[in-house]
Image (cartoon, helix red, strand yellow):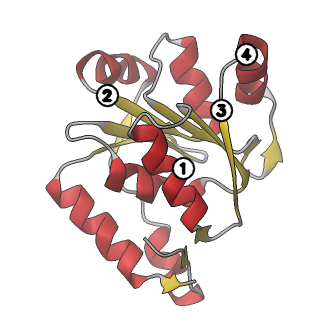
Amino acid sequence: MAGRKLTPSLREEFKKPVGRDISESELKTIHAEHKLITVGDVVSLTAYRLGAVPILAVYDGMTERHGTAGFADLVKSEGLAETVVENPAATITDALDSAVSDALAGRSAAILRVIGEEDLALLPCILHAPEGAVVVYGWPGRGMKAVDTDGPSRAYIRHLLDSMEEI
């Protein structure tokens, strides 16, 4: 996939949540029944604390644009391997897309630290996820959302990606 950039005209479309609201207990159930992918510091930390270790955790060390050390500290203290990739705000770089694809194919670490912003990593995570996986991400101020990686979800995400400007 070529890199993509969010244009000002698409911002409202991208503010609409994808998926369903879930609770912490539902996160454990999802992990027990599906392959789990997490996007965001708080969601990834919550999953690890619950023992729901995802097949891929994507984080940037920030929560609502403020520094947070929680998940980064866990990665460091546990000595967990991670891949680091740069990705500016409002973009999905080729590097981010490749890092997600490689991690989900088992070719690199299952933890991906983004220098910049990881918010749009949700899109390649859904597209590259194995069939039947569930991607859980944080919705600031509202909790967690879960997206099934089924045909309709992938089609909607493909539509969003296709509407972005190629970089």
Q: Residue at x 47, y 37 (%)?
A: 107
Quote the CA–CA distance across marks 2 and 4: 23 Å
Q: Is residue 39 above or below residue 156?
A: above
Disc 3 residue type?
A: Glu
Q: Earlier in the sequence, mark 1 or mark 2?
A: 2
**Circle 1 or circle 2, nearest the eye:** 1
Numbered disc 4: secondary structure: loop
Picture coordinates of residue 167, whole percent (x, y)? 58, 83
Picture coordinates of residue 41, whole percent (x, y)? 65, 36
Numbered disc 2: secondary structure: loop
Quote the CA–CA distance across marks 1 and 2: 18 Å
Mark 3 surroundings: few (<14), some (14-19) or many (≥20) residues within 10 A:
some
Q: Is residue 10 above or below residue 108?
A: below
Quote the CA–CA distance across marks 1 and 4: 20 Å
Q: Residue at x 71, y 66 (%)?
A: 88
Q: Nearer the viewer, residue 86 or 135?
A: 86
Picture coordinates of residue 126, whole percent (x, y)? 35, 51
Q: Which mark is residue 35?
A: 2
Q: Which residue is mark 4?
A: 79
Mark 4 surroundings: few (<14), some (14-19) or many (≥20) residues within 10 A:
few
Q: Which residue is mark 1?
A: 99
